[in-house]
């Protein structure tokens, strides 16, 4: 690793290598747990930076994304999000009108998620030294249940909260001027996560499937637990539009980013109860697989006719096929 | 008809599985020419479904895999020139040249752009009149017409700043080169359907006849591939050597005449060095003499000193069907998609990448 490439920000293997090889100088017990947010006594704390091109999608902009991202990270460790910070890096020449629209989205999304914006920062960089606007948010929440990926064990079930890949697909459609009726899934997951937390369910792990998509989350869980994950391909919900765009570009929907979709690992006995709760929020929620007793840290995808293959962690930049 | 789900339908696949198992009488080596087929075979787990007598052999049909290192080095030299925007398709960005890849060069600040739509180069050229735009044109018969369209538009718009690094290659000469290798044992071919959408299914007729080898022009879905395998078995049992057009929903015998005319207008055959196969006479296409002024290799200094390929890498043998990725000592050890040694591991259409991605633990 001599220099940073775009792949180091992709949420796949290169990013993990960067964290393990370079950022490991900060090693401590909290970081080692590798959860979406740090679990600190009865608090949860997350931070995230947001770059998006284009900054306005059909129904979502970078502002909404920036709130949902940090809020969802806090929710994923079983905490109720309470306070948010907002740091903006603006490029010289950025239109104030666009900034107003983005801030309005941030305000609306904070209200929906029940979080209070309590501190912030603004910097401006010279023209051509940034990409219109970069946003960083941090979120603090209060623990309800301490959900830690280290609790994953064999026999647990894996669920997904809705159909996958909608955000990544919406970005592709926008960037390539395609005509497809697809909306980003970007949303705060507060309602469904609090419903799960308040039910009598033994939640082993939760993770929102952002960069690297479903595939990155499952592979991370396989590595952290050192167990095999068996996933039933026909159970994974993918909408027709996402499937169509993936076929066009040669991508797999499992690797596309999501911004309002999460993966859940629960005790087998709780899988139906968890599914019923998830279905109240999205009819496409599904039980997609299980953690096996096989001590091989890998994800196995079994298709409808019984053939199996490995589902690898995403690598590098997502590049469309050549022909 | 649902063009995706109907061709991934469980019931049809299971019926075809039974039919194939009931008809196969002896081991059969089937070369899938195209890397897209290799990936489909792996992605849909077909080796698990099909009888063990069927041995799939990966062929030379991935444009990234067959690109010799020198041509990558030339691309790197062109992309390093000041005042240049270098436009490239997909995986070519990741292929290592002698010293670095285009992705490394981009990280150092070179303006290298990965495109999905090659026609975007026209917009880039129009918006950047003060810069030289170079399009890294690659691919088999499938992508050549698109390069033709870009050239045609460039000429119509009188663009003076758009140049082409042409690396188009042809399927039939590559297949012939393989069949002339005495070590090769191939009983039948899966022909890439997207090539035949342009050329028509008829391009394989001389090969099927000359080498007494059935060829099934096949789509990329599991039902397509299994129907093609079934036909190959039936042909072998009946001792026939026809070109079977499984992908008749899109492919005609004569192909896309407009696209073929466009290719003929701007390109002429030339010798091309295929990685692993050596120089194949008339194996590639280059610009006709009257378009030399658009040829980046003629307009700019393209002299490079390329290093030899790594001796540990057996991509050459893999591309000729003489070895499987597992046979390579560095496969999944020193050579991984993150640190590829050979282009078969770099390209998402490459055989090694397919075996690594879907089947590495079955080695």
Image (cartoon, helix red, strand yellow):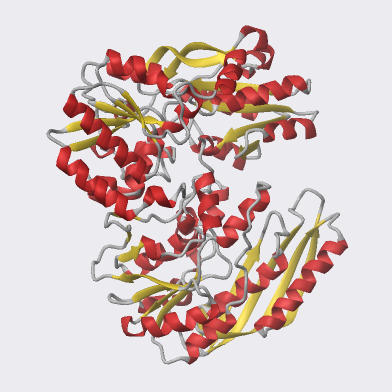
> Do we see residue B40 in this rendering?
yes
**Residue B351 percent across, percent down from the top left:** 35, 37
Residue depicted at x 68% and y 79%: A84
Tell me if residue B251 comes above or below residue B18 in the rendering: above
Q: Tell how many labels.
A: 0
The answer to whether B336 appears left or right of A146 in the picture is: left
Q: Is residue A152 above or below residue A144?
A: above
- Horizontally, is A190 left or right of B82 in the view? left
Q: Residue furthest top?
A: B289
Measured as percent of width and height from the top left, residue B29 is found at 22, 31
Which residue lies at the image location 41% right of the left edge and 34% below the top edge? Answer: B247
Q: Position of residue B295 (x, y in %)?
A: 64, 16
At x 66%, y 68%, the residue is: A65
Q: Nearer the viewer, residue B12 or A280?
A: B12
Percent coordinates x, y for residue A96 in the rendering:
87, 63
Q: Can you say whether A263 is above or below B293 in the image?
A: below
Q: Residue furthest left?
A: B25
Tell whether A182 sits left or right of A143. right
At 38% from the left and 26% from the top, the residue drawn is B309
Q: Nearer the viewer, residue A225 or A62?
A: A62
Confirm whether residue A147 shows in the render.
no
Displayed quadrant of residue B302 = top right
**In terms of image quadrants, where is residue B352?**
top left
């Amino acid at each position: 690793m001599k220099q940073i490439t775009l792949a180091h920000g992709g949420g796949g293997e290169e990013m993990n290598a960067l964290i393990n090889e370079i950022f490991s100088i900060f090693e401590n017990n909290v970081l080692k747990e590798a959860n979406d947010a740090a679990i600190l006594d009865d608090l949860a704390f997350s931070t995230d930076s947001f770059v998006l091109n284009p900054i306005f999608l059909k129904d979502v902009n970078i502002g909404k994304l920036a709130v949902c991202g940090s809020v969802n990270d806090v929710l994923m460790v079983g905490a109720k999000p309470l306070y948010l910070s907002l740091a903006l890096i603006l490029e010289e020449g950025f239109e104030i009108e666009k900034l107003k629209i983005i801030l309005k989205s941030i305000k609306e999304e904070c209200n929906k998620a029940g979080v209070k914006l309590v501190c912030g920062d603004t910097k401006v960089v010279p023209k051509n030294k940034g990409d219109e606007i970069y946003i960083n948010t941090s979120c603090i929440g209060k623990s309800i249940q301490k959900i830690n990926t280290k609790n994953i064990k064999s026999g647990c079930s894996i669920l997904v909260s809705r159909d996958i890949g909608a955000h990544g697909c919406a970005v592709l459609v926008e960037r390539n001027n395609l005509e497809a009726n697809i909306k980003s899934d970007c949303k705060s997951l507060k309602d469904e996560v609090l419903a799960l937390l308040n039910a009598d369910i033994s939640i082993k792990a939760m993770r929102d499937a952002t960069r690297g998509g479903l595939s990155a989350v499952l592979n991370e869980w396989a590595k952290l637990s050192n167990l095999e994950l068996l996933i039933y391909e026909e159970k994974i919900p993918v909408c027709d539009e996402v499937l169509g765009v993936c076929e066009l570009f040669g991508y797999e929907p499992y690797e596309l980013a999501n911004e309002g979709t999460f993966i859940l690992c629960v005790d087998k006995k709780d899988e139906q109860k968890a599914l019923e709760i998830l279905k109240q929020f999205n009819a496409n929620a599904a039980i997609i697989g299980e953690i096996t007793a096989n001590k091989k840290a890998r994800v196995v995808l079994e298709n409808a006719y019984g053939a199996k293959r490995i589902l690898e962690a995403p690598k590098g930049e997502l590049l469309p096929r050549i022909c | 008809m649902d063009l995706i789900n109907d061709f991934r339908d469980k019931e049809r696949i299971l019926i075809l599985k039974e039919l194939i198992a009931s008809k196969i009488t002896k081991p059969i080596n089937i070369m899938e020419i195209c890397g897209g087929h290799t990936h489909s075979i792996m992605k849909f787990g077909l080796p698990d479904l099909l009888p063990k007598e069927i041995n799939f052999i990966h062929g030379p049909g991935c444009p990234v895999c067959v690109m010799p290192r020198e041509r990558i080095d030339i691309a790197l030299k062109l992309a390093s020139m000041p005042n240049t925007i270098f436009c490239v398709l997909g995986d070519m960005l990741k292929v290592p040249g002698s010293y670095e890849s285009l992705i490394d060069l981009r990280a150092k600040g070179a303006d290298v752009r990965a495109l999905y739509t090659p026609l975007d180069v026209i917009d880039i050229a129009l918006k950047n009149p003060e810069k030289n735009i170079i399009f890294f044109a690659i691919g088999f018969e499938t992508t050549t017409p698109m390069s033709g369209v870009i050239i045609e538009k460039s000429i119509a718009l009188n663009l003076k700043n758009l140049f082409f690094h042409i690396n188009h290659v042809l399927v039939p000469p590559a297949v012939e080169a393989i069949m002339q290798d005495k070590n090769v044992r191939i009983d039948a071919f899966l022909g890439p359907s997207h090539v035949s959408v342009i050329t028509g299914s008829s391009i394989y007729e001389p090969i099927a006849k000359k080498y007494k080898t059935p060829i099934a022009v096949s789509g990329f879905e599991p039902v397509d591939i299994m129907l093609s395998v079934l036909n190959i078995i039936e042909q072998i049992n009946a001792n026939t050597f026809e070109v079977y057009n499984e992908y008749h929903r899109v492919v005609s015998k004569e192909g896309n005449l407009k696209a073929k005319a466009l290719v003929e207008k701007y390109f002429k055959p030339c010798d091309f060095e295929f990685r692993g196969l050596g120089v194949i006479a008339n194996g590639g296409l280059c610009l006709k003499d009257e378009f030399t002024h658009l040829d980046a290799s003629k307009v700019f200094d393209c002299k490079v000193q390329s290093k030899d390929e790594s001796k540990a890498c057996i991509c050459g043998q893999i591309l000729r069907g003489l070895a499987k990725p597992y046979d390579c000592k560095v496969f999944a050890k020193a050579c991984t998609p993150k640190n590829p040694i050979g282009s078969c591991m770099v390209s998402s259409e490459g055989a090694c990448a397919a075996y690594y991605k879907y089947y590495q633990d079955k080695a």
